[in-house]
Amino acid sequence: MARIDKVVSVFRSKTLKLHTTRSWDFLGLTLDETRVTPMEFTNGQDVVVGIFDTGVWPESESFQEKPGMRPIPSSWKGVCVEGEKFEPAKACNRKLIGARYYLKGFEQEYGPLNMSGNPEYRSARDFLGHGTHTASTAAGSIVKNASFFGIGQGTARGGAPWARVAVYKICWGINGVGSCTEADILAAFDDALHDGVHVISASFGATPPLSPFFASSADIGSFHAMQLGITVVFSAGNDGPEPSLVQNVAPWSLCVAASTIDRSFPTEIVLDRNFTIMGQSIISKEIKGRLANAITYFVDGVCSLGNWNKKLATGRVVLCFYTPGLVYEIAQVAVKTAKGLGLIFAEPFTKPIADVDDDIPTLHVDINQGTIIGNYLAESLKLPVVQISPSKTIIGKSPAPTVVYFSSRGPSSISPDILKPDITAPGINILAAWPPQTPPTLQPSDDRLVRWNFQSGTSMSCPHVTGVGALLKSAHPGWSPAATRSAIMTTAYTRDASHDSILAGGSMAGSTPFDMGAGHINPLKAMDPGLIYDMKTSDYILFLCNMGYTQERIERIVLPSPGVDTNCKNMHGPNANINYPSISVPNLRSPITIKRTVRNVGCGKKTTVYFGVAKEPDGVEVVIWPRVLIFSPSKQEISYYITLKPLKKSEGRYDFGEIVWSDGFHHVRSPLVVLVNNSDDFTM
């Protein structure tokens, strides 16, 4: 097959997995800011957002065209493909302008799609809900009075509510889990690039260990997209908080971590009608039963299947405590198997809840609250009656944001000289559109029907950045994907609403760039970043050369184009000099000098002066030269140099700093990540 004309390369098709309101207000994009009209952004309605996911529920209000939407742009070459319960004339409109589905790779891997015992639609129609949710988060229309049984009530909308949506169904349900094959992913990229999308949202990834870039459809397809000026946004994965499990680490795409917003869902727990304590949950109906201690059903009181003593907890809400290695998801499975009515889970640090009445209704409390409940239980002569009320919604919870514990962390396992993730965005308890025929928990026993549902994961943070990317495309249509990424990264913030360092869930220590990349996305600041770090295709080819790839392997990745040279003999310079908006040096053994080039995209009609400041990583001297950049109408691009000098042996850990350029209004910040090599031949 590899010898067939037009076949660039052959590699084994793997299966990738999906990474599964208040959030836009929290990001500073109020309704006034998101009402993108032709008068405000002339190309606002001509931006097309491509969603690579599980399809779409086209009848959702989020995908209905609104009065004032112009005809579909003449540049659009895409189609709406007919399929099971998907009639293009009814499903597509001026808002939802494209819908395709891809099954060849999936059926080659798993056999014919089973739609009887495994509900699915042989079309672009969404059953799992994941694609409907992400599409409405990125670019859904404005819809009033959205809620989940009254919880989280408000106006729902995507980040770019006037943008067009095109869906590419590449992920299919297997027992409630979305699976996406390499072959279908690459086919979708080919079509999306032909159709004319401007931004692609891809909330999926491969389980580590990661494949090399030349053997990954997502990396190859996103490289082709970059060459054509299309920004591709990926999710970082949900394998945190352990290090080096971040996915989608190619430097030509954006990789998004997940963080919280300032919304909480307090839930009242009443014992024997006279003792009340507050937990956190998303529970839509009252629960009433008896409170029981985990020790009754689990050896040593550790709530895991391996410790279950086979006693049934029917009608009981079981109190479980965190132990090392025991996360609440494990306790949920154990208590559900024991036929428990509900779970109260106590843990030493406050985790944001990430479930909607999941496998079993779960309330989260901290260790102190759990101890109080446990003491009450121990002092009671009989099992107390426990009554749990439906959850409420409170705005203004602090600290926020915090990086979510499950968000995959850096450094990159295959290219640590490029910092990943790039950015963090809201990804916990995001309320967005949902197929009304799909249970909100995806459990067959769940008979509730909803049009809006809470979901959590980097799958949810990814479309937030996609929506911002669409706004940037409408405001700056000439920007490259690298310029868009630079604007998003260099304007990010690293302190929460209380002006403290953003915390890292899982440890509740301060976040590092391995947790949150450059920081938390700031959409309004990204519109006017001041300076940008731009990149060309040749910069990425240099990166691949420095990875040790042969020309043949590089040509598997690069879309053949006039003037594109893939011969590494013509490429010179270390990866440290690649013009990325962050700086990562994983092996500093002696002083090195790094080059960066910035372009002024602020006011180009007058002279603008930027001053540079370095915050030094521990044990590293940082010198910037020149420390003053003077931009004029005739000089809008300037290079500067950073010299890093190790001052002492490291302790085998990374240290962090930053480079900031400011003209008094713009603050252009780049994370600096350095690991000093702790070898015997260390010299000062």
Image: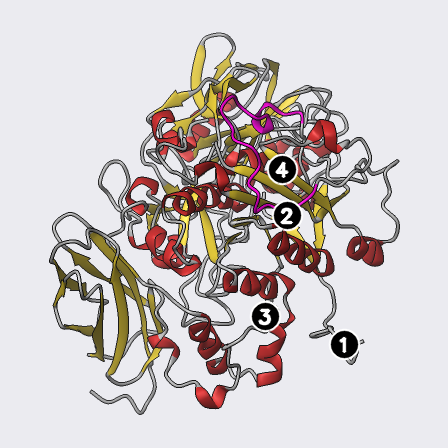
Q: Which mark is residue 97?
A: 4
Give the mark nearer the N terminus: 2 vs 3.
2
* In the image: residue 248, left or right of residue 263: right
The dominant secondary structure in magenta is: loop
Real-space CA distance between mark 2 and mark 4, rounded to the nearest whole angstrom: 10 Å
Image position, residue 348 (x, y; %): 42, 40
Write down the region rendered in magenta. Answer: 59-79
Q: Secondary structure at mark 3?
A: loop
Q: Which mark is residue 445?
A: none
Q: Tell me, yes or no, if residue 68 can be seen here.
A: yes
* Circle 1 residue: 5
Give the mark nearer the N terminus: 2 vs 4.
2
**Residue 672 among those drawn in magenta:** no
Of tags 2 and 4, the one toward the viewer is 2
Looking at the picture, which amino acid does disc 3 mark? Leu
Real-space CA distance between mark 1 and mark 3, rounded to the nearest whole angstrom: 15 Å
* Circle 2 residue: 77
Looking at the picture, which amino acid does disc 1 mark? Asp
682 over 242 or under it: above or below = below
Real-space CA distance between mark 4 and mark 1, rounded to the nearest whole angstrom: 33 Å
* Circle 3 residue: 559
Residue closest to the eye, 119 or 535: 535
Looking at the picture, which amino acid does disc 2 mark? Lys
User: Measuring 49% from the left and 30% from the top, which residue is drawn there?
Assistant: 364
